Image (tube, rainbow, N blue to C red):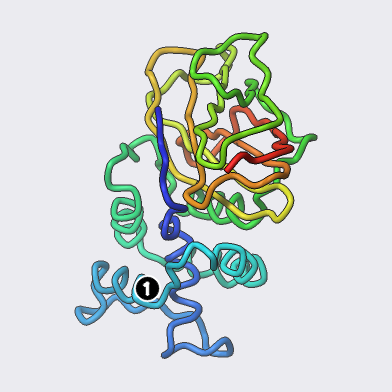
Amino acid sequence: MTMKFIVPILIGLVCFGLGYLIAPSNKASDPIVLESDNKHTSNSFIQNFQQNVPVQAENNIELQQQLKNQITQVNAIIDQATPQQMEQYLQQAFPDYDLSSIKNKREFAKHLVSEYVDAKNNPNEPMSGRATVMAQQEYAVENVLPRDIYAGQQLFAHFDTLGKTPNNEQVFVRWSDRSTGEVLFFMPQRISAHREQNWVSFSPHTGWKPGHYDVKYYQMNDQLQPIAQTSFYIQNVIQ
């Protein structure tokens, strides 16, 4: 499926964690308490967090580092959220996607934050499928990514489940800058159902830059289980 998005404002659970940590009414030394009385319904709980989260794309690296430094607190917040709060927040964060396959929302949230703050592929992590990035929508073994890429060019990350994972109509996908660790895109995407081979295309809203990049695919389940990953290199960018 083709996509050309600005870096997502913030993935839902990232908003959830950081929004609570930086809210003016809560200092770092304050105990973590989630109130659930009538004054703090799930909706107002969500809205208060969103109002206190930076939304500029250029803050992505800073946001990732803050979350990484406070991962224990973030996980504690997730543990203390009610099931209703988790359900509503995920639905608001990803309103156009089917989340019914995610049974344990807390576990999913923790995996989501972990994969967001450590956004470089681990070559030693076992994968059930395989992936590769090309400049063409049609997959062919002979299609090798050229070293010279236009700044706004769509690149296609093809992946194959090899029949080892369910062929669902949704996957989670992460594109990241390997040199800086910055997440460029981290969201669910719809794909063609009942097929082992699929693709998602992407182009950063600020344009490609020379360097190394990572792409990683995940199943939409509690563990955010990886399907396939790949890395690619852009040598020159044509403006």
Looking at this rendering, what residue extends furthest in the right direction? 124
Q: Kindly state the secondary structure of the residue where label 1 is placed.
A: helix
Q: Residue at x 63, y 23 (%)?
A: 131
Q: Nearer the viewer, residue 6 or 88?
A: 6
Instruction: Determine whether, in the image, residue 158 is placed left or right of residue 220.
Output: right
Quarter of the picture holding the N terminus: top left
Please give left or right for residue 237 compared with residue 25 in the image: right
Q: Residue 23: horizontal and vertical position, in percent? A: 43, 83
| Front-lying residue, 207 or 239 | 239
Q: Position of residue 158 (x, y in %)?
A: 56, 22
Amino acid under disc 1: Phe
Task: Count up the numbered dots.
Answer: 1
Of 196 and 232, the residue lying toward us = 232
Residue shown at 53% from the left, 27% from the top: 156
Describe residue 56's horizontal placement relative to residue 100 as left or right: right
187 shown above or below 70:
above
| Residue at the front extreme of this rendering | 239
* The C terminus - image quarter: top right
Q: Position of residue 81 (x, y in %)?
A: 40, 66
Residue 148 percent across, percent down from the top left: 67, 32
Residue where numbered disc 1 is placed: 49
Say few, some or many: other residues with alpha carbon within 10 Å of mark 1 (under 14 / 14 to 19 / 20 or more).
Answer: some
Q: Residue at x 29, y 71 (%)?
A: 47
Q: Farthest residue in the left direction? A: 38
In the rendered view, tell whether residue 32 sits above or below residue 15.
below
Q: Residue at x 68, y 18 (%)?
A: 144
